[in-house]
Amino acid sequence: MASTALAVMGTASGAAAAPACTVEYSVVGQWAGGYQGAVTVTNGGAALNGWRLGFDFPAGQVLSQGWGGKWSQSGTSVTVVNEGWNGALGTGAKVSAGFIASWTGTNTAPTAFTLNGTPCDTDAPPTPTPTPTPTTPTPTPTDPTVPPTTPPTTPPTTPTPVTGAPELTVSGNRFTDQNGATRRLLGVNRSGGEFMCVQGYGFFDGPVDDASVRAIADWKANTVRIPLNEECWLGLDNIKPEYRGANYVTAVKDLVAKVLAHGMTPVVELHWTHGQYTGNSAGCSDVHATCQKPMPDARYTPAFWTSVANTFKNDERVVFDLFNEPYPDRATSTAAQAWSCWRDGGTCPGIGYEVAGMQDLVDAVRATGAKNLVLVPGLAYSNDLSQWLTYRPTDPAGNLAAAWHVYNFNTCADETCWNSTLAPVAAQVPLLAGEIGENTCGHAFIDRVMKWFDDRGLSYLGWTWNTWNCNSGPALITSYDGTPTTFGIGLRDHLRALTS
């Protein structure tokens, strides 16, 4: 990853009472002809009610989009003005904004910034006032609004990540923990909870004891995604009594607890749902939750998320992934119909049951008071995020991120598509590739995916921590002790290298 960081600080020359400021400028990710940047401003002076940051691009960079403020460019001059929700900038407070720009030649960083027209320069800080003698004490200011006469002498330090699984929140286009440290979700899927119960065989496919969870952690994974079945969770009577309702919920809670005990983030995800669909690309004709349906159902899915949210709302280390792989685009005739169905639900063309849209599910989660991070997938089996930003649900908690899946046989499976459809989403919200995989029994494809995501500081999870044939369903392991397949070696060694 190409990265640079710059911190400048100071006060306006000859203006002792002018606001002191610190600006951190960084390149978050860089690729051929483009890059993602970020600025963080710390106000060391009097509280501001409205701010304007200015700087010049020194090497012909051209702004294409920005967030966290109203961005504009005139010639080489760039201006960022606060949004309505982040205009207040108290003494010592920080505000961050990000952008995407193009570049040619050398991507030289800006060297001078202004805050509300006052320069923040690279001159040495003013000489400290000499310590007064006992006979001429300096009065202690009593007015808390009096600005300091000297700026901070050091740039802000990078927050230290919390130990163990974090409570994740969305900060611009990053996941952050309780300390404000940026976090990435890197790990695996643990399939089984979506199908074993409805097929009458148990709760999970293979062991989920402490040793098997420890084996995941030994790969240096920090996240485990756990697919679920709504009929098993809700205890519907088509499920064997021993595998439904309270018994199923207890099994899921036990696995979540083991994942947390090993310092990893559990992502509970709704995989299989109720609703009869026999249209294009139907996985089954069964009304019951025995396969992937094109959309969640209004009859049971909001109740499922109400129950799951109530179960885990007091532990914000648990992440909610609303629905595995929507594909209303296979049932409807236009993209507008598909995206409207995706967001709003209701009666959707080509789908015979009442649909719960992504907004319905976000509302169900937030109505419980849960503030947990929520992941929202796109269309085309979560492989299409082209209109995710246009149709994204409203989240009163402001803790919503995008989920995406990719395999070597998907439509959006190369860097050209990722640059055109993923990069704009990742510029505004955190992006998690909840499933990455390939049916080659190798790892050349996921190596490309991981590089693209690493270069941009994004998150990804391999499919899947199960001992299956890697051709029929990409399997990472041959044994639950963590012995990898050839495919799994690629993910395991990469995760270990990232933390070495």
Image: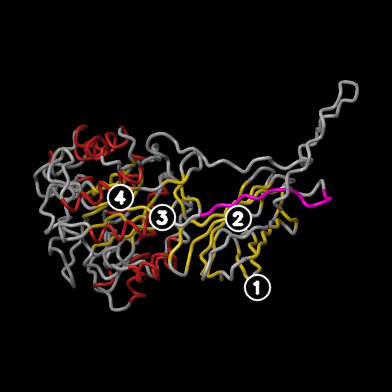
| Residue 404 appears in the picture as rendered | yes
Residue tagged 1: 74
Residue tagged 3: 401
For marks 3 and 1, the one nearer the N-term is 1
SS at badge 3:
strand
Mark 4 and mark 1 residues within 8 Å of each other at the beta carbon: no
Indicate the position of residue 266 as horizontal and vertical percent values.
31, 42
Indicate the position of residue 359 as horizontal and vertical percent values.
39, 59
Residue 60 as seen in the image, left or right of residue 303 = right
Residue 83 as seen in the image, left or right of residue 303 = right
| Magenta stretch, residue numbers | 4-15
Residue tagged 4: 303
SS at badge 2:
loop
Quarter holding residue 358: bottom left
Q: How many marks?
A: 4
Residue at the farthest right position: 135
For marks 4 and 3, the one nearer the N-term is 4
**Residue depicted at 78% across the width and 36% down the height:** 128
For marks 1 and 2, the one nearer the N-term is 1
